[in-house]
Image (cartoon, rainbow, N blue to C red):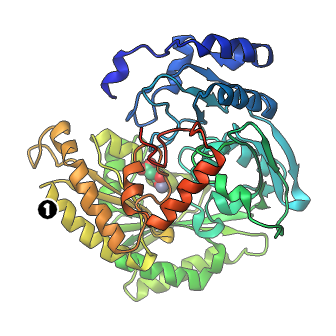
Amino acid sequence: VDPSAQRPATADPAPLAELIAELAPQLGNRGLLTAPVDVEPYLVDHRRLYRGRTLLVAAPATTAEVQAVVQACAARGIPIVPHGGNTSYCGGATPTESGVEVVLATTRLRQVRAVDPANNSITVEAGCRLADVQDAAAANGRLFPLSLGSEGSCTIGGNLSTNAGGTAVLRYGMMRELVLGLEVVLPDGRVLDQLRGLRKDNTGYDVKQLFIGAEGTLGVITAACLKLFPAPAGHATAWVGLASAADAVTLLGVLQSALGDALTTYELVPTIALDLVLEHVPDTTAPLSSNHPMHALVEVTLSALDSDLPARLEQALGAAHERGLVGDAVVASSLAQREALWKLRETIPEAQTREGASLKHDVAVPTSDVPAFIDAGRAIVERSIPGARLVAYGHLGDGNLHFNVSPPKLGAGPGNARDFLAHGPALKRELHDLVAQFRGSFSAEHGIGRLKVGELERYEDPVALDVMRRIKRALDPQGLMNPGKVLDDGR
Ligand code: MLT
Ligand code: ZN
């Protein structure tokens, strides 16, 4: 948390009183927060990288109220920071230290507006939590497949604004691929109404796509029509011990051939990540009786017609074991066992946090290049920070690794957290240069936010950056939407 923490949480320049007077009749007390205790949760990001200040927090409950806030701010040149469940890893929803911004919290935009099982679609407001959308789909015999560790608190607006990924991308795609329609309040206060549930619509530019992954820099997403899928008849879940990441990639191909697109999840867990979980997370046990350098969490989603899939998964793993590709494997035989296996994967970030400070990188390369990338990246880590421990885990099926680095064991390298973290910028540069050599991404699923603005400047194709800036200027000529995020606007 930076030193501006010492300054008061809200500033009080002249426009504030005016803004409140204009908005109070419509938003009321619940919709306008200024008391330091109410405002505080909106000022610090989930990773505590940033502490900002704000004029006030507006919490509109309808699209018309969002419009009112955006119009009132636009008229006075007041910047707006859209804010959902505050689970960003890159500070995208946290106000800057300027104190002149209004935080626009979406958490009261909470309606499930419609569920249409026959159209396989659901229309929800931006502040709905991801878990609530999953539940609403399930209550209607359908699946909303986006799935991530923070699903109990992240919101659909944030998922859209960061184009969230998670653990089912292999089969269902990222958030962008799950969207049929959007409703957005533009920076000038107009409502863009593309809230349609169409799977086919070739009427000109697909304008709504601009707002997905834009992290609130082009407007405020207020609602979305999302794709639903048939509810699964069940799952088959396996934990697999492997000799290497290369074998994990080979096994992925083998399982895809055997199981087709029923393969939903294919997560890579190196031994060091499993060991951290077993050490720090209560009620976890080793899934296999033998030790393996590498592991994969594999899940197959069953449709009503697929009753033989669990047997096909077991057979495929058995055959892979026979030919030496798989060291050992277990297929969950109960819901409790399935949950226990998932816990070993989903608590890796928590376990790594408990181990101490960590240097995080969210990278993607073509899946086939993952083993070579890990080898080259490990060499960089070992050379840069003697004794540091690479914890490279994640969504192997998507070529996306959380290439995180934990400090050396006590006495084995840079002793305290500050010395360790001081290596962060140089390490990041070398790793992201390596990503560029692989024509990969330095931000696979966590976005740019404030944290990676410089990285985008450095690594993005200049033509693409120019197009982004033109789009930003066209939609937000005053530069009022989430300033300082995604694009470098000189702040
Ligand atoms: C994950 O896949 O666990 C998260 O995206 C990354 C993290 O929390 O480090
Ligand atoms: Zn992830």
437 to 475, vertically: above or below: below
Position of 223 with respect to 402 (left or right) is right
Residue 85: image quadrant is top right
- Relative image position of residue 328 (x, y in whole percent): 40, 73
Q: Residue at x 40, y 56 (%)?
A: 457
Residue 13 sits above or below residue 359 on the image: above
Viewer-nearest residue: 160 or 250? 160
Q: Nearer the viewer, residue 114 or 336?
A: 114
Furthest toward the bottom, the residue is 323
Residue at the image position 28 percent from the left and 41 percent from the top: 357
Q: Position of residue 258 (x, y in %)?
A: 59, 84
Corner quadrant of residue 136: top right
Neighbor class of circle 1 (other Cα within 10 Å; few <14, some 14-19, many 20+) is: few
In the rendered view of the protein, which quadrant contains the C terminus?
Answer: top left
Q: How many marks?
A: 1
Image check: 222 left or right of 248?
right
Left or right of 98? Residue 478 is right
490, 150: nearer the viewer: 490
Q: Amino acid at mark 1?
A: Arg
Residue 346 can be seen in this image: yes
Residue 91 at what x, y percent from top left? 46, 39
For disc 1, does the CB lie below 8 Å from ligand 1?
A: no
Which residue has dot 1 on it? 383
Q: Residue at x 36, y 79 (%)?
A: 246
Which secondary structure lies at badge 1? Answer: helix
